[in-house]
């Protein structure tokens, strides 16, 4: 794989995902993954690395599942560009470049059309539920009273100074704050 593509692949794909994909003996590299028949493998690998729990239908890392679809589409675009430009890559040969272009385009169509149904909608739902279930801490009643008393005292002092024309600018500023 050429350095630029390998670097992008490393950035976009977490190491665990790469290991899962490359563990299959048939799949030797990135371009072997970019085939429509590997769509379900990509779904399963994403579920594994994002910590999907089948029973509760939740993710340990829902944002990872969401971003993986976008990353895969970007990789498809870059791979397609590489094939169209007829670049020679070390250890990668195609007997039919048009077939490879078609495979990459078909996989991207699957990702665009079905990634949401397979993963993104569940991950987004999980992410939203976790956001809404997060507890928020409110200040205690005692703290609110202390704050209110302090601000009232500051306002009274500033009003008195303003009324007696002492330090008018700072008094006015304090009142407006």
Image: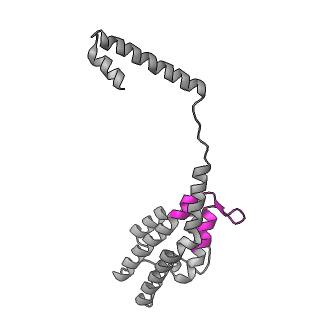
Residue 20 occupies quadrant? bottom right
Judge whether 64 appears above or below 173 on screen: below
Magenta stretch, residue numbers = 42-66
Report the side of 59 relative to 6 (left or right): right
Q: Give the residue at the far front of this rendering.
A: 163
Image point 57% across, 56% down: which residue?
128
Q: Quadrant of the N terminus?
A: bottom left
Which residue is rendered at x = 45% and y = 19% of the image?
A: 152
**Horizontal side of residue 71 vs 44, given as left or right:** left
Which residue is located at x 58 percent, y 59 percent? 62
Q: Can residue 13 be seen in this view?
A: no
User: Per the image, is 64 magenta?
Assistant: yes
Residue 173 percent location from the top left of the image: 31, 22
Can residue 153 be seen here? The reply is yes
Give the image location of residue 120, x and y in percent: 55, 67
Q: Quadrant of residue 159?
A: top left
Depth order, front residue of 17/114 = 114
Instruction: Pick the residue in front: 43 or 112.
Output: 112
Give 26 or 172, whichever is nearer the viewer. 172
Residue 16 image position (x, y, % from top left): 59, 63
């Amino acid at each position: 794989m050429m350095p630029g593509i390998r670097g992008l692949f490393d950035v976009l794909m977490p190491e665990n995902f790469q290991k899962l994909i490359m563990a299959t003996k048939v799949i030797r590299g990135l371009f072997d993954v970019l085939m429509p028949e590997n769509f379900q493998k990509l779904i399963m690998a994403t579920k594994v690395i994002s910590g999907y729990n089948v029973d509760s239908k939740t993710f340990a890392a829902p944002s990872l599942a969401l971003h993986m679809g976008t990353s895969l589409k970007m990789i498809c675009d870059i791979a397609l560009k590489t094939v169209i430009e007829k670049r020679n890559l070390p250890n990668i040969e195609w007997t039919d470049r048009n077939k490879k272009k078609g495979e990459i385009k078909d996989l991207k169509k699957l990702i665009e059309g079905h990634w949401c149904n397979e993963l993104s909608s569940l991950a987004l739902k999980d992410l939203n539920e976790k956001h809404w279930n997060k507890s928020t801490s409110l200040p205690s009643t005692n703290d609110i009273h202390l704050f209110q008393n302090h601000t009232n005292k500051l306002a009274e002092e500033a009003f008195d100074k303003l009324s007696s024309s002492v330090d008018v600018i700072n008094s006015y500023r304090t009142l407006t704050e």
